[in-house]
Amino acid sequence: MNTLRSVFCCFVLFAFTLPSVAKSSEDNLALHLQHYVNLSGQFTQVISSEQSSFIQSSTGEFWIKKPNQFRWHYTTPYVQKIISNGDKLWVYDEDLEQVTIKDASQSVGSSPLAVILGSIELDTLFNITQLDNSEQLEWLMLTPKEDSSGFEFIKVGFKDGLLNKMRLHDSFGQTTDLLFTDVTINEPIVDETFEFIVPDGADVFEETPN
């Protein structure tokens, strides 16, 4: 579940592009959050820890459709799907044949993921600063305003105005690095992408909303 929480935090920054005439860091991010409806692409995710030499690497695909639909699909080294149609959130682990169903508004509404879905103003969650360019990328750093967020900072790297890399460092010394490729903005995505049919024989755990 730590991996899932990292993913939810990271989702907040997909698809930001930088304008040719720079404004403030906050304006750059907010502006481009408003200028897409659909977003898709591929990702490579690497998780490492200060307390361990173990490194976990995975790859997959993602789809987002405003206001509240998304699909985050790990394809290697295991299959895991996180899907929301705006009402329900499904987490499916293929190896365990296990599905967890949650209320989407409670699971997402208070998380950074809510920003990319348009339900929260960016500067209510983060202090945003422009960093020096490195690795031939333009970098922004987002520092959460609340200690309860579970992470210390997110760094976002842009290449030619398009999101290229992200690094999230949490309060437990764990770092999640993401590399984004083949990012597509505003290509049509069918609604069926954000629905999930529970496979026959899978164990189902449904959490009741408070």
Image: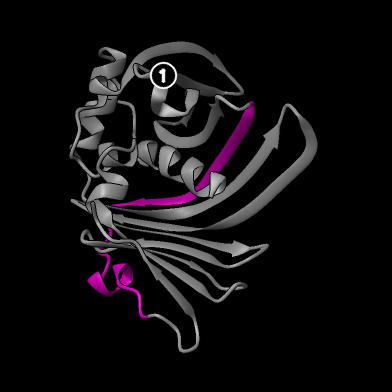
Q: Nearer the viewer, residue 208 or 139?
A: 208
For the question of whether residue 24 can be seen, the reply is yes
Q: Residue at x 27, y 74 (%)?
A: 192
In the rendering, at what x and y percent does residue 16 appear?
34, 35
**Colour pattern:** one colour
Drawn side of residue 1 relative to residue 29, left or right: right
Q: Is residue 70 magenta?
A: no
For the question of whether residue 65 can be seen, the reply is no
Q: Determine which residue is flagged by label 1.
A: 147
Q: Nearer the viewer, residue 129 or 24?
A: 129
Does 167 sit above or below residue 104? above
Q: Is residue 185 magenta?
A: yes
Does 119 sit above or below residue 183? above
Q: Residues within 10 Å of mark 1 (few under 14, many from 20)?
A: few
Question: What SS does tag 1 mark?
Answer: helix
In the rendering, at what x and y percent does residue 79 appear?
58, 68
| Three-letter code for the amino acid on which mark 1 is drawn | Asp
Residue 114 position by quadrant: top left
Q: Residue furthest bottom?
A: 200
Q: Residue furthest right?
A: 53
Drawn side of residue 140 relative to residue 124, left or right: right
Q: Residue at x 44, y 36 (%)?
A: 163
In the rendering, at what x and y percent does residue 10 appear?
44, 39
Q: Residue at x 45, y 84 (%)?
A: 199
Q: Residue at x 59, y 36 (%)?
A: 176
Q: Nearer the viewer, residue 111 or 55?
A: 111
* Boundaries of the magenta span: 173-197
Does 180 sit above or below residue 99? above
Q: Nearer the viewer, residue 93 or 25?
A: 93
Residue 161 position by quadrant: top left
